[in-house]
Image (tube, rainbow, N blue to C red):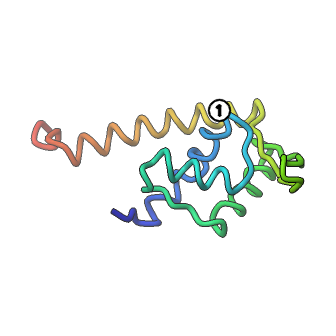
Amino acid sequence: MKIDKELMKGSTAVLILKLLEREDMYGYMIVQKLRVCSDEIFDMKEGTLYPMLHNLEKAGVIESYWCDSDEGRRRKYYKMNSKGKEMLKRKQEEWNIFSKAMDSILGDGLNEH
């Protein structure tokens, strides 16, 4: 099932930060990991990913560095810093509140109010 891009807009940054919390990654690796971890629900295009990475870097929540791969190709890796960890924590708290509210409306909770 394809997810509406408007639903994805608000969660792209938190998804990227969550992946970078686990390990440093280069762009294509982020796209692949999102696809696999979400059972192919999150199929982010590079045209969406790279502007988001640049915005997160500009905001000072991630940093980048270049690294040579085993094949000799240089890749730009991204890593989360302490400011990014704080942002991720806030975004996860926001998501929990939002998700709980959505569940109460979309689930049977509406009948209780």
Q: Which residue is mark 1?
A: 22
Secondary element at tag 1? helix
Q: Nearer the viewer, residue 77 or 85?
A: 77
Q: Nearer the viewer, residue 90 or 51?
A: 51
Mark 1 is surrounded, within 10 Å at the Cα level, by few (under 14), some (14 to 19) or many (20 or more) other residues, namely few
Using the image, determine if residue 46 lies above or below residue 13. below
Q: What residue appears at the point 39 percent right and 62 percent down from the top-left corner?
A: 3
The answer to whether residue 87 is left or right of residue 54 is left
Using the image, determine if residue 38 lies above or below residue 44. above
Residue farthest bottom in this picture: 47
Quarter holding the N terminus is bottom left
Q: What residue appears at the point 42 percent right and 50 percent down from the top-left corner?
A: 39
The answer to whether residue 70 is left or right of residue 87 is right
Q: Position of residue 49 (x, y in %)?
A: 65, 60
Q: Position of residue 111 (x, y in %)?
A: 10, 42
Q: What residue appears at the point 59 percent right and 53 percent down from the top-left corner?
A: 32
Going by the numbered disc 1, the residue's amino acid type is Arg
The answer to whether residue 12 is left or right of residue 49 is left
- The part of the image, by quadrant, that contains residue 45 is bottom right
Quarter holding the C terminus is top left
Q: What residue appears at the point 67 percent right and 31 percent down from the top-left corner?
A: 86
Q: How many marks?
A: 1
Residue farthest left in this picture: 111
Q: Position of residue 10 (x, y in %)?
A: 52, 54
